[in-house]
Image: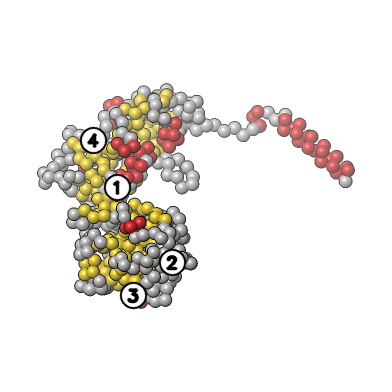
Amino acid sequence: MKMTFKYILLLTVVVGIWTGCKRDDDYVKSTPSAFISNFDLKKLYKNTDLVLNAKLLGGATAIKGIVISDFSAGNSPTGLLILQNSRMAGNGIDSLRGMAFNIGADASKYAPGDSVHINVDGATLKRVNGILQIVGVTNASVKKVASGRTLRTQAVNTGKILANPSFYESTLVTISSALYDPEPAADATYSGDHVIDDGFGNATIHTETTATFASNTVLPTGNFTGIPFISGSGASAKINLWMRNADDFFFVVLPKLSPVIITGYMVDPNGGDGNNEYIQFIATRDINFATTPFAVYTTNNAGASVTPALGWNTGGSRTYKFNLTSGTVSKGQYFYVGGTNKNIDGSSSVVSTDISSSKWIVSLDYSNLNGADGIGTKTSNLLANSGNVAGIAVFSGTTVGINSIPLDVIFFGGAGGVFYSAGPPEVGYRITNTDYYSTINPLTRLPQNFYGAGTNTSRLSFPSAATSFSKLGGVYDATSGRWVSGRTLTSVKLTPTSQLSEIEGDGTSLVN
């Protein structure tokens, strides 16, 4: 045993001596990348001029990316070559970022889709007229290595751009379902500056008077693609979107007027979900449900492993239907659909505030009764509060088929579950044009009629804490059917003594 220990000790000494005597070239060497991404470069910028060099950039001296600027129609900032790139960032982070390079008149020599390498050693990163750009580079610093590369376009609303301007400036974006504000005259053209509103904020469409499409007549609504530049900061930040050519606008029809709008939901009431969950709506006109009925569907997809073949009519544990066929409601009035308990925060050892005096159009003991028309089996989990994606939809009339289009629809919860198949045939939950969904893909301009298809992936989160009401605050135009301000989620923490004003106050409101 002692001899074994001696041998082990001797071996340890020999290995130590051998390791200590290794030559430098016995080690694995690594060479820093010659290129830095826009994602990493922007993190170095602290709102003061920054001289770029290899030491500052971790050994890098150049930037590579795909050109998105386009001078062919005469509507691109003078002298600016604009490119975007990305790198593997991990944890689901989208690292696509853009950057402008001031190389003068030679910028017009490059076309969208060109892949270029730009030497930035000794150049300066600074803001000029609100545009973050690299100055001190010339065309001699640019090397074109390929052409015809695919351009990546992001579909994003103005609210997201204003919330994270450095993410989106100098990238290619599409702002969808927007309209001019104010409404343009019949003979209005693109020339100059025009404000658009997509329900989440404003952007200014800028068109040079010399652009080839400057004299084209504008259409009032649609999707706008271009390169955004951000001027100002904080509350005074402003988006200036430069369309590259006339094809960067695509006309789309905005949402049609819905008499009923989804404004909130209670998914996790105190004392258990069964017969305590409810959905809040607002009427955009006076409604007599006996003469103008509607249908409300829910889906929670808990444990779902197959595509809902019949969409909202799949039934079973996937979807549940309520028919709204009696009662009246006035324009601007909140009303409710849900369980028969009608307590604001469910019922436990301390019964919460009774809200039965509010306007309830349907109250059904869904814990013990199947859904209307046999769609949906009795359930203690009408609205999901964890796990897979869940949703709510409202339809005109009570006869709803697989091809019926909802009036309004909202999805919330997790990303899991099987809820869409491209087919053929295409199967899933149909959507309509709302503040969150579009039946036309703003990037491909092709139809996308289901949740999960194309860009229809937006979903609201679960409430931030148990026994919280999910309040959807927005502003809806009751004349045009357009969202003046898109719905945003506020989690309202409830207690047994909470009052109705807490879930109705500062919620969705109407104009006109």
- Mark 4 touches mark 3? (CB < 8 Å): no
| Image coordinates for residue 278, horizontal then vertical, percent | 37, 65
Question: Which-is-in-front pick, marks 2 and 1?
Answer: 2
Question: Which-is-in-front pick, marks 4 and 3?
Answer: 3
Q: Mark 3 to mark 1: distance in Å?
A: 36 Å
Residue where numbered disc 3 is placed: 372
* Picture layout, residue 95 above or below residue 59: below
Q: Mark 3 to mark 2: distance in Å?
A: 28 Å
Residue where numbered disc 4 is placed: 75
Q: In which quarter of the image is residue 164?
A: top left
First reached walking from the N terminus: tag 4 or tag 2: 4
Q: What residue type is labelled 3?
A: Ala
- Mark 3 touches mark 1? (CB < 8 Å): no
Determine the secondary structure under disc 2: loop
Q: Which amino acid does label 2 sit on?
A: Val
Q: Which residue is drawn at 25% across and 61% down?
A: 333
Q: Mark 2 to mark 1: distance in Å?
A: 39 Å
Q: What residue type is labelled 1?
A: Phe
Residue where numbered disc 2 is placed: 351
Query: Mark 2, residues whose alpha carbon is within 10 Å: few (<14), some, or many (≥20)?
Result: some
